Image (cartoon, helix red, strand yellow):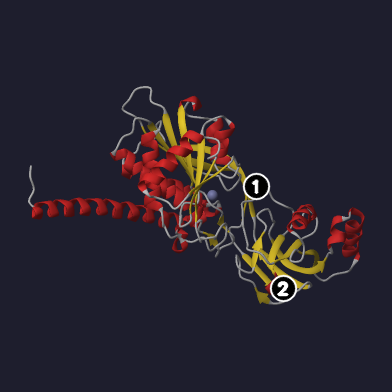
């Protein structure tokens, strides 16, 4: 067939439209899934209002809509964990002034709730770190006749980060028998508590509080024992017999809610990575690989990599038949490139990534790191299963705070990273 210039132009135009349309819908779907996971209806994908379970149902439906089947009859793999939660009131007043949750104060994830007043008594670093001084400080507080209950106040703003670590160990022990308050001046970073202290433990920003005075608390906490979580698993078998399996993983859980009105959307961490494994599922459903491809959306990551530990210890497939695991966590930016944890362990695979990236001009830079127990690839590595953990780097520094929102994601390199991962699988 010989095309005229006009015909050739039309042909190229159609190709261009086809290509961009596909790319547009791919990024639209990625954004839709990310945004849905971050919405208030999912309650921060934690344990209040079963936000994690709502997310699990959503992900199951997404697998069904794409046409990706479960590995056995169910998409779900259940396991249990103990978790402390804050499902209701979360009010703190300092000297009558209402403090804003997540901005002015954070509650320690292991803290108990309390309704009542606390009078603050600051403890010096030396008193806190010398056992006898600490004892007499506490005894003295209990001997005073108070209207309000006493609480020990730690000022963390003027001490080194190593000393802060030591003081926090002391504070956690103290919070078993006297309430504890910390004054801080660095960025808030929340997490998930797996057990409960007897008493309240609160962090307050230094611009909201003096080193004495009275706090009024109206805080409710609730400990769940054996809370049921679910990993969500989809599977696309290879047409080849005896094919090895590639597993794409991403945790979909996040920190949930800190009281009625405050939730942690967990957009970058890790709605972004979860949505990305569904983009890959869409691709491999349409373009089957020589490998079996499994997609695992893990629960319980923020509670200490619990879902991935359960998956590896109760594996539904022979771990020896896994060719490679690619774990995606914090995938919402990429302006500065990506980093591959375990990149320095697997030279061959790392150089495949780099060659694809160089020839296709995808992301700015691929950095490699050694092993680290910082996400769900860890348990695979511990069992000798080759695994990479990939995260994006960029100007978005919101992490484990209420500002890690859908609107703060740039999706700068999402399409390029998806291409990189598809090429990587094709070249393994
Ligand atoms: Zn994460």
Looking at the picture, tell me which residue is in the foreground, 57 or 317.
317
In contact (CB < 8 Å): disc 2 and disc 1: no
What element does badge 1 sit on? loop
Which residue has dot 1 on it? 194
Mark 1: few/some/many CA within 10 Å (<14, 14-19, 20+): some
Q: Is mark 2 within 8 Å of ligand 1?
A: no
Residue beneath label 2, please?
209
Residue 426 as seen in the image, left or right of residue 180: left
Q: Is residue 188 left or right of residue 256?
A: right
- Name the image quarter holding residue 217: bottom right
Instruction: Give x and y (percent) for residue 235.
Output: 38, 35
Q: How many marks?
A: 2
Q: Residues within 10 Å of mark 2 (few under 14, many from 20)?
A: some
Residue 150 spot, x, y in % from top left: 81, 65
Q: Which mark is residue 154?
A: none
On-image quarter of the N terminus: top left
Residue 363 spot, x, y in % from top left: 42, 51
Q: CA distance from mark 2 to mark 1?
A: 29 Å
x and y percentages locating residue 211 in the rendered image: 78, 72
Q: Secondary structure at mark 2?
A: loop
**Which is nearer the N-term, disc 2 or disc 1?**
1
The answer to whether mark 1 is within 8 Å of ligand 1 is no
Is 177 situated left or right of 291 in this image?
Answer: right
Q: Examine the rendering and report whether any part of residue 278 can be seen.
A: no
Residue in the picture at 21% in, 54% down = 17
Residue 279 vertical placement versus 163 (above, below): above
Write the residue at 53% across / 43% down: 229
Judge by depth and name the residue closer to the eye, 116 or 271.
271
């Amino acid at each position: 067939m010989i095309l005229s210039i006009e015909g050739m132009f039309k042909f190229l135009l159609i190709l261009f439209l086809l290509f961009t349309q596909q790319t547009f819908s791919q990024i639209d779907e990625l954004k839709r899934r990310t945004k849905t996971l971050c919405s208030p209806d999912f309650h921060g994908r934690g344990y209040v209002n079963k936000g994690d379970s709502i997310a699990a149902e959503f992900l199951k439906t997404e697998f069904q809509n794409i046409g990706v089947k479960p590995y056995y009859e169910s998409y779900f793999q259940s396991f249990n964990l103990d978790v402390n939660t804050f499902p209701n009131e979360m009010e703190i007043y300092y000297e009558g002034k209402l403090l804003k949750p997540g901005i002015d104060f954070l509650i320690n994830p292991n803290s108990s709730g309390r309704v009542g007043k606390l009078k603050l008594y600051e403890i010096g670093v030396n008193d806190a770190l010398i056992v006898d001084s600490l004892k007499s400080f506490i005894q003295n507080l209990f001997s005073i006749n108070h209207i309000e209950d006493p609480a020990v106040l730690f000022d963390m703003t003027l001490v080194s980060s190593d000393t802060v670590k030591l003081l926090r160990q002391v504070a956690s022990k103290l919070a078993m028998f006297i309430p504890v308050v910390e004054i801080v001046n660095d960025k808030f970073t929340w997490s998930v508590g797996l057990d409960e202290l007897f008493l309240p433990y609160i962090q307050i920003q230094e611009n909201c509080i003096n080193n004495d005075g009275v706090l009024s608390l109206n805080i409710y906490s609730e400990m769940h024992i054996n809370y049921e979580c679910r990993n969500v698993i989809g599977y696309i078998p290879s047409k080849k017999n005896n094919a090895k399996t590639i597993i794409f993983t991403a945790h979909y859980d996040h920190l949930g809610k800190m009281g009625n009105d405050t939730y942690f959307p967990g957009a970058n961490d890790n709605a972004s990575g979860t949505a990305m494994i569904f983009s890959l599922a869409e691709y491999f459903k349409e373009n089957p690989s020589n490998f079996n491809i499994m997609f695992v959306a893990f629960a319980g990551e923020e509670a200490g990599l619990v879902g991935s530990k359960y998956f590896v210890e109760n594996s539904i497939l022979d771990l020896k038949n896994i060719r490679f695991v690619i774990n995606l966590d914090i995938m919402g930016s990429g302006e500065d490139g990506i980093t591959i944890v375990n990149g320095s362990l697997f030279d061959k695979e790392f150089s495949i990534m780099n060659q694809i990236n160089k020839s296709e001009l995808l992301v700015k830079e691929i950095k490699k790191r050694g092993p680290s127990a910082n996400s769900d690839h860890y348990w695979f590595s511990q069992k000798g299963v080759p695994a990479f953990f990939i995260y994006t780097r960029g100007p978005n520094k919101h992490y484990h705070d209420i500002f890690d929102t859908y609107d703060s994601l740039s999706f700068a390199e999402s399409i390029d990273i998806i291409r990189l991962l598809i090429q990587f699988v094709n070249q393994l």
